[in-house]
Image: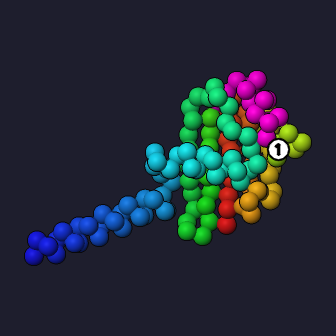
């Protein structure tokens, strides 16, 4: 009887972890660097600036699609250097609406769907998808 309860509890914990890992927006600490690298690769973007603040990493999607969202704050100078060093941003003319510059990247690199990079003052939001 105890063995059966342990097996059921183990299965429940495994399914809970699988759900959190594949279907939730939670990015576990051991996934963070991989998610950042994948997002940068999909967007043809340079490494993140060295002096950033308020770094946030999220994911969305399922087994068949994935969207990664990275947000951070940096100085205007750091952001400008990052744009110049990013192959898909440096020659890309952004759409400007209410002080928000949006760079569209379609299709993305490495057979990804692509996405966009939005910049408002010192805040950068990168959103890249694969399907």
Other-residue count near label 1 (Cα within 10 Å), few / some / many at <14 / 14–19 / ≥20: some
* Residue 93: percent from left, percent from top: 89, 42
Q: Quadrant of the N terminus?
A: bottom left
Camera-side residue: 41 or 58? 41
The residue pinned by badge 1 equals 87
As drawn, 76 above or below 128: above
Camera-side residue: 94 or 31? 31
* Residue 84: percent from left, percent from top: 83, 34
Where residue 131 sits, quadrant-wise, is: bottom right
Which residue is painted at 57% across and 35% down in the image?
55
As drawn, 33 above or below 82: below
* Residue 66: percent from left, percent from top: 61, 61
The reply to whether residue 97 is in sight is no
Question: How many discs appear?
Answer: 1
**Snapshot colouring:** rainbow
The reply to whether residue 105 is in sight is yes
Where residue 111 sits, quadrant-wise, is: bottom right
Which residue is painted at 62% across and 65% down in the image?
65
Q: Is residue 121 magenta?
A: no
Drawn side of residue 103 relative to residue 63, left or right: right
* Residue 89: percent from left, percent from top: 82, 42
As drawn, 63 above or below 75: below
Which residue is painted at 64% across and 28% down in the image?
50
Bounds of the magenta segment: 73-86
Drawn side of residue 82 relative to residue 72, left or right: right
Q: Is residue 81 magenta?
A: yes
Drawn side of residue 100 relative to residue 27, left or right: right
Which residue is painted at 77% across and 57% down in the image?
108
In terms of secondary structure, what is the magenta stretch mainly?
Answer: helix
Element marked by disc 1: loop
């Amino acid at each position: 009887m105890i063995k059966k309860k342990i097996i059921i509890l183990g299965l429940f914990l495994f399914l809970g972890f699988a759900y959190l890992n594949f279907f939730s927006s939670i990015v576990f600490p051991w996934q963070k660097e991989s998610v950042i690298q994948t997002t940068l690769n999909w967007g043809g973007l340079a490494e993140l600036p060295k002096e950033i603040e308020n770094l946030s990493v999220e994911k969305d999607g399922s087994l068949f699609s994935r969207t990664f969202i990275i947000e951070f704050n940096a100085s205007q100078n750091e952001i400008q250097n990052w744009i110049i060093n990013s192959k898909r941003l440096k020659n890309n003319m952004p759409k400007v609406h209410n002080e928000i510059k949006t760079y569209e990247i379609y299709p993305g690199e490495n057979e990804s769907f692509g996405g966009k990079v939005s910049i408002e003052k010192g805040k950068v939001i990168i959103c890249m998808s694969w399907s």
